[in-house]
Image (cartoon, helix red, strand yellow):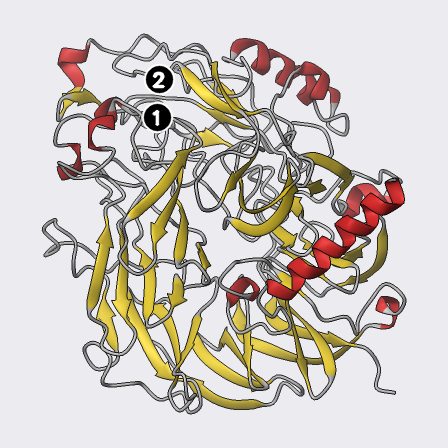
Amino acid sequence: MLRMLAFFLAGAATLLAADLRSFDTWTQYLGGPDSSQYSSLKQINKSNVKQLEVVWTYPTGERGNYLFNPIVIDGTMYVLAKNNSVVALDAATGKEIWTHPNQGAVGTRGMNYWESQDRSDRRLLYINAGFLTEIDARTGQTIASFGDNGRTDLRVGLDRDTSNLRPLQTNNPGRVFEDLIIIPLPAGGANYDAIPADVHAYDVHTGKLVWVFHSIPRPGEFGYDTWPKDAWKTAGGVHNWNEMTVDEKRGIAYIPFGTARYDFYGANRHGQDLFGNSLVALDARTGKRLWHFQTVHHDLWDYDLPTAPKLLTVRHNGKMVDAVAQPTKQGFLFVFDRVTGEPLWPIEERPVPKSDVPGEESWPTQPFPTKPPPFARQSFTEKDINPYLPEAEQQMLRERLRAARNEGLFTPPSFQGTIEMPGNNGGANWGSSAVDPTKGTLYVVSKELPMTIKLQLPGAGRGGRGGGGGRGGAPPSGAAPEAQPPAPPAPAETVEGGFIRYNAPYDFMLMSNGLSAIGPPWSQLTAYDLNTGTILWQVPNGEVSSLAEEGHTGTGSHAPRGGVLVTAGGLIFVATSSDKKLRAYDPDNGKVIWETSLPAASEGVPAMYEVGGRQYLAVCVAGGNGLMAGRGSPDKPAPAPGPGSYMVFALPRK
């Protein structure tokens, strides 16, 4: 009977695979509109991956961190390099074909490609200096008929005064669907005065705005009553800063939204704050909301949804279900029927700690999925302190943990300091998950680093960036915990716009040796079977070179930013920062099959493609040392980033 069942399931998976899109190209960033980060190419496989060799490299032209996911069309690779130029390369040799220079910033994560049905018109679409920009994919020339001489201002369509608003540059390249390009607006800043980050769709031929979805609802729109009255006029944030996904067959766009501003204090936005921290399914042709699910109510932790929703098909309760899976910064994986939005497994609203900050109204419950289990640790106690720290620092951390609010996941920010685990860097982050859509499996890289959040009035203490854009006014690593701050002034003395404003300097809790306050593993690779909602295996992802040299292995990389790539050849490729390596894991058990050293950290998503019957693996080498690497103390600054490059691997020619 078991053999018959296994045969039936295998047959169902085979039939399913026949109905899926082709996965043998990389014509869109993250592999395709479904953001699968999956390739069906099999030439490189478990039996020969150890033979991989570098076949060409292309220097990016200057120092800096590169994350850009290349795309490949008709044997031409398109990359970002040479002072923010778009460069076309021969994907088999790396030879430069043409270069299109840009003035100002270009979205760092990727770009879009569109072609007409007869393929006579082929265009590249990307964000440059706050403008949606189009160039000819064959020549690199500006398409002057698009927008205003080749570009469209993303500020057009906002229902606020934009006369003093700087250009809205975003690193999320959006998604092409049919003859539309769907672009999420950035929040325009991390402070209270951020703008609402609506989603716009433009005609790829003309650049004209076709539809708008308001991320902060207007009167009469669904979710308006989850904010204070008229909050849409002043509230900001709720931005899709990272990635989005499109189900081309159904015409559904899945938008993972971020936190309402301010990230760590919400007296200006009492309520649940839809569509903050929500996965929203939109009709891709009209922008109409189909369904949504909010993963954090009234977010106070900057737990925005950090990675693209993943589309796959699973067997659930005896039926094949087209699902969408959403990883989160807090280490949860939420899984829904992608058409109806119904969770595949129950999600419980559980009581969470209450805020003690004047003016704050934290939400009393938060959603906890009953399945699958979390992929990252969600608490930091004394038993978890990093054993590789000097004893004096370990003792300091014990005192710091005892003095802080530390009541587990969703402990609100406070004046005394709050321990947040995982910190707002994740959990999951950009590019950190991939699926095998033919098997119903998902693979996610975690960052398991804590953070301390400490609210203070503007101008108090050491100050900070207000918007929480960095460590701000956090104490230097290794310093003794600060004394308990005085009680805040009476609200009447500090009211601005009807609420008390606070800064929230935060500390990534990096210590004198550059490592986290918490002990390893600092990163793990987790494999899920979403047919059952269970973890198949979980292994440390990478190493810290200095510790490995001392014999301390299995620590996981420190703050990795390398994306995941899964292949039908039975391989999972992941690059790590703190040891500057690229690895191939076995999806059956998580064992490392192959690894190679890189000249610098790789912090983007690899791309896989085929040209002339030969399979290639392209890796963006960031030229840096990984996020937060080497920032442990003022006297040990991070090394300057080295020159970046694109490295392309293949098997030796026969």
Left/right of residue 247 with respect to residue 588 in the rendered view: left
Left/right of residue 324 with respect to residue 100 in the rendered view: right
Q: On screen, 231 above or below 271? A: below
**Residue highlighted by disc 1:** 298
The circle drawn on residue 370 is none
As helix, strand or loop, the secondary structure at mark 1 comes to loop
x, y (%) of residue 609?
65, 75
Left/right of residue 101 with respect to residue 334 in the rendered view: left
- Where the C terminus falls, by quadrant? bottom right
Left/right of residue 382 with respect to residue 121 in the rendered view: right
x, y (%) of residue 327?
55, 41
Judge by depth and name the residue closer to the eye, 410 or 262. Answer: 410
User: First in sequence: mark 1 or mark 2?
Assistant: 1
Q: On screen, 500 above or below 244? A: above
Q: Please tell me in which quadrant of the rendered image residue 251 appears.
A: bottom left
Judge by depth and name the residue closer to the eye, 264 or 18. Answer: 18
Judge by depth and name the residue closer to the eye, 20 or 605. Answer: 20
Between marks 1 and 2, how big is the CA–CA gap?
7 Å
Q: Residue at x 35, y 82 (%)?
A: 135
Q: Residue at x 76, y 41 (%)?
A: 540
Near mark 1 (Cα within 10 A), the count class, few <14, some 14-19 or many ≥20, is many
Q: Residue at x 29, y 41 (%)?
A: 237
| Amino acid at the residue labelled 2 | Ser
**Disc 1 + disc 2, Cβ < 8 Å:** yes
Residue 45 appears in the figure: yes
Q: On screen, 633 above or below 201? A: above
Q: Please tell me in which quadrant of the rendered image residue 134 appears.
A: bottom left
x, y (%) of residue 136?
38, 86
The circle drawn on residue 362 is 2
- Where the N terminus falls, by quadrant? top right
